[in-house]
Image (cartoon, rainbow, N blue to C red):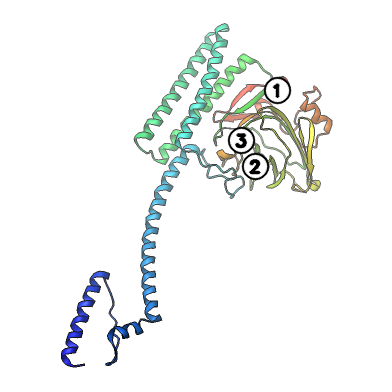
Amino acid sequence: MHGSSWKLFLLSFLVVMESSAQDFGQTQFICTSVPKDVDLCTATMQNSGPAEDLKTTVMQLRETVLQQKETIMNQKETIRELTSKLSRCESQSLPTGAGPAGRRPGSKNTMGDVSRGTTDTLAQLGQTLQTLKQRLENLEQYSRGNSSVQANSLKDLLQNKIDDMEKQVLSRVNTLEETKPGPRNDSEQRNNVETTLTSLHHRLTDLEKGKDTRPADKFQLTFPLRTNYMYAKAKRSLPEMYSFSVCLWIKSNASPGVGTPFSYAVPGQANELVLIEWGNNPMEILINDKVAKLPFLINDGKWHHLCITWTTRDGMWEAFQDGVMRGNGENLAPYHPIKPEGVLVLGQEQDTLGGGFDATQAFVGELANLNIWNRKLSIAEIYNLATCNSKAPAGNVFSWTESNVEIFGGATKWTFEPCRSLN
């Protein structure tokens, strides 16, 4: 190629490369020798073989990776913001010491529900307040014919307490609309509300005791809402048991699943003894985290009497509904005694000892006359319990009396007599 031709070629090459650099930003130029008698375009096509394609692919992949990296960074920031918001929402509904809960320790949520947000929490508080107000109105109607200075003074005190609670809820709504409170302030407000609700309930119960003068065992517990703060607790633990019978009256029409009527947790095992119905699954009894499905059908809004017996030898169990055996089985935690030094909770499933409640597993409905024996009851004894026979025994491990049960979070007590109060 003559000198003038080389100059013309190099000038054209530089113009093209400058244009390409402007279009693609930073680039790297690679010089390739071209035979004298070969057309430049043809040579370029011949040299753009697999190696050149590979380089192009690598550059495209590098550009894609950089874009994805930027996207991931943006998503991390978004996730961080959402996590912060979720923590603030959860602090409203979780009781002190509770964390995300599942049906079993470390397992996923089993009822397919999501954590309740601010709106649901406020709605629940509103419904609980309405229930307390209704109870107070009933007491007011009763006191009109049985007035006394002490009753009127207590009534006024309760009315003031309820008015204060309504102001707190209203203030909470306004605060949420105007700003986002920090988790610490949110937790303090929630604790104050729960403490006031529990105090209100105890005062109402004391007043109702004076009105009803009911026997110590003639009461029922009502759990109107699926929450993670409404529950009752036995005041003492269960002993070590190599066999047991547990019986109770229960009423619910909750769907899906009535939740957890009771759970007994011990150190190191949250599912030592649990009765639960979750989702569309049948009711189950768990012993040392081993499961047996029970043939109960109870979510019809009517009272039913349930009894479950178990013995550690071969893990034999029997299930009775309304005095009739509905099923039995074996190999349910065989040769594992029920351990002592635990916590018996009514209305919630425990994921930690005495806590870790999950609203999706909470019991919704009414229960009464929960009794536990450290032996296997006979069929006749179970039938006497279901038919309210005077010969029916009381639990020798846990008996249903008001002095044995503490209630929290707005669960309520009402007078109940088995068989007379049915349906």
Left or right: 40 with respect to 328? left
Q: Earlier in the sequence, mark 3 or mark 2?
A: 3
Give the residue type that dot 3 points to. Ser
Tell me the SS state at disc 2: strand
Say which residue label 2 marks.
265
For label 1, count other residues whose C-alpha is less than 10 Å away and answer few (under 14), some (14-19) or many (20+).
Answer: few
Q: Quadrant of residue 395?
A: top right
For label 3, count other residues whose C-alpha is less than 10 Å away and answer few (under 14), some (14-19) or many (20+).
Answer: some
Say which residue label 3 marks.
255
Residue 71 is situated, as x and y percent measured from the top left of the image, at 38, 58
Screen quadrant of the C terminus = top right
Say which residue label 1 marks.
422
- Give the residue drawn at x 75%, y 34%: 307
Residue at the outermost left position:
4
For label 2, count other residues whose C-alpha is less than 10 Å away and answer few (under 14), some (14-19) or many (20+).
Answer: many
Classify 390 as above or below 11: above
Q: Earlier in the sequence, mark 3 or mark 1?
A: 3
Q: Is residue 317 visible?
A: no
Residue 247 is situated, as x and y percent measured from the top left of the image, at 73, 32
Give the residue type that dot 1 points to. Leu
- Give the residue drawn at x 16%, y 92%: 3
Q: Quadrant of residue 59?
A: bottom left
Classify 9 as above or below 96: below
